[in-house]
Image: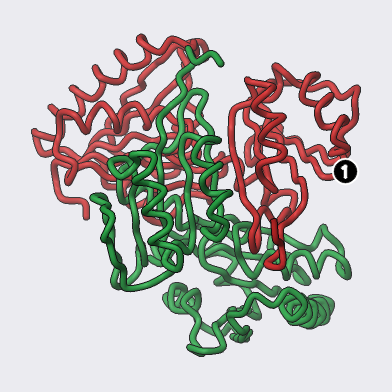
Chain colours: A red, B green
Amino acid sequence: MTNRGHFYAVGVGPGSPDLLTLRAVDIISKADVLICPASAKKNESLALNIIKPWIKKQKIELVKYPMRKDVGGTWNLWEHVAKRVKKGCEQGKIIAQITLGDPLFYSTSCYLLTSLEKIFPKSHIHVVPGITAFQATGAKFGLPFVWQEDSFMVMPASDLQRIEQAISWCETLVLYKVGKVLKEVLFLLDKYNLFPSSYLAAYVEQEGEYLISNLKKDLTLPGYLVTLIIQTGHKSWNYKK
Amino acid sequence: MTNRGHFYAVGVGPGSPDLLTLRAVDIISKADVLICPASAKKNESLALNIIKPWIKKQKIELVKYPMRKDVGGTWNLWEHVAKRVKKGCEQGKIIAQITLGDPLFYSTSCYLLTSLEKIFPKSHIHVVPGITAFQATGAKFGLPFVWQEDSFMVMPASDLQRIEQAISWCETLVLYKVGKVLKEVLFLLDKYNLFPSSYLAAYVEQEGEYLISNLKKDLTLPGYLVTLIIQTGHKSWNYKK
């Protein structure tokens, strides 16, 4: 699998090194170059911290990106990185980009994969899945997400009208980045009597992890990168519309 | 983490042993008893095949279950298993249930966790997340699922009206068990001109894996446990309703 001249988008999971897959460890160990996205502000890569046990001779390339909602700037940055990846792979290198969680969910890998595919053969581009934050959060609460005829949905907590609709669309709804609109989301949960079946967490499998299962109106939080799980019920096989 | 007298629901991923997490391998290796769900028809456990590299002295308990949509029978079976788990844990054993994918998504662990929680302390019940079939399928196609303001949804392919609604609700929709309603679903994809952005797969990371990205009206399939990924577009940060 690790012939020379290949690119791997590798998910390293939510935070704890033992939530990496064996495949992720194998690729990271064999890579010549590891691309690690890092917030420009903090100048450190959480993904890089997670994989420290397996860092030996790999060349580390931090890609600093501004945490801004700038569509054009984001694509420009990753198109530039894609060109560097292409060049390295053509020189026979194994290049891996590591990202928190899974590379296909709200990850910088989404941009790099899309940009790279336009200029480099797809047969040399690979994705190694990783455990997402929502999986780790559900696991911490011991919370079955979906069975039988249930549906499951994930979205960022930005558009309140869409969140209100989603509550009626699925049996388990996961909202990311809840902190900034916490007050409004708590109002919605109260309106639909969903406090008893909602679960909030941050920094899951990281330092400072917090888990809250007794939500209430006047809740305040230390951060904004909060994951909220809302369960609206279950649809059994007997369910008929 | 592995004190005596604990229960672990462990996800073993979609099929390939190297898609287990290090934590899953650790728990499986240390367990006294491994509960392995097996279809009553085939009398074999795919999950058990996946973890063969780590089977030594663990006691294997196959739980055969009928593949029927029988709500009462299903709960009765898993309540019975929960009682056995409680008894074993109270004798100081480490008991792990292994399931394909992630324990919280359409898994027999959903029933066992729910049943066990009613009779055994939650502090002794744990979930080890695993790579789901939809993550493995997206990875094979190298298909970014969601970025920026996108939403993501998973549901079984049973209620066609609900599928048609879901196409307008989210940017990436994953349908499970598509085989039985394939003709009707293909009709929907054609109606909304979604053939170019739909991807179908079965047995991903297993023997006989097939991946189809050029869907068409007259498609026929060898099985029914098929996963379909439908992408309807992306919502960027600039998106305004």
The reply, left or right, for residue B163 in relation to residue B85 is: left
Relative image position of residue A200 (x, y in whole percent)? 75, 36
**Residue A93 locus on image (x, y percent):** 16, 38
Q: How many labels were placed on the picture?
A: 1
Direction from residue B83 to residue A119 in the image, left or right = left
Pointer 1: what residue?
A196
Q: Nearer the viewer, residue B3 or A179?
A: A179
- Classify the position of the N terminus of chain B by image quarter: bottom right
In the rendered image, which quarter is residue B133 located in?
Answer: bottom left
Q: Residues within 10 Å of mark 1 (few under 14, many from 20)?
A: some
SS class, disc 1: helix
Residue at 64% across / 75% down in the picture? B69
Which quadrant of the figure contains the C terminus of chain B? top right
Residue A23 in the image: x percent, y percent?
A: 37, 54
Residue in the foreground of this view, choosing between A239 and A191: A239
Q: Chain of mark 1?
A: A
- Type of the residue with mark 1: Pro
Q: Position of residue B2 (x, y in %)?
A: 69, 64
Which residue is located at x 40 percent, y 13 percent?
A71
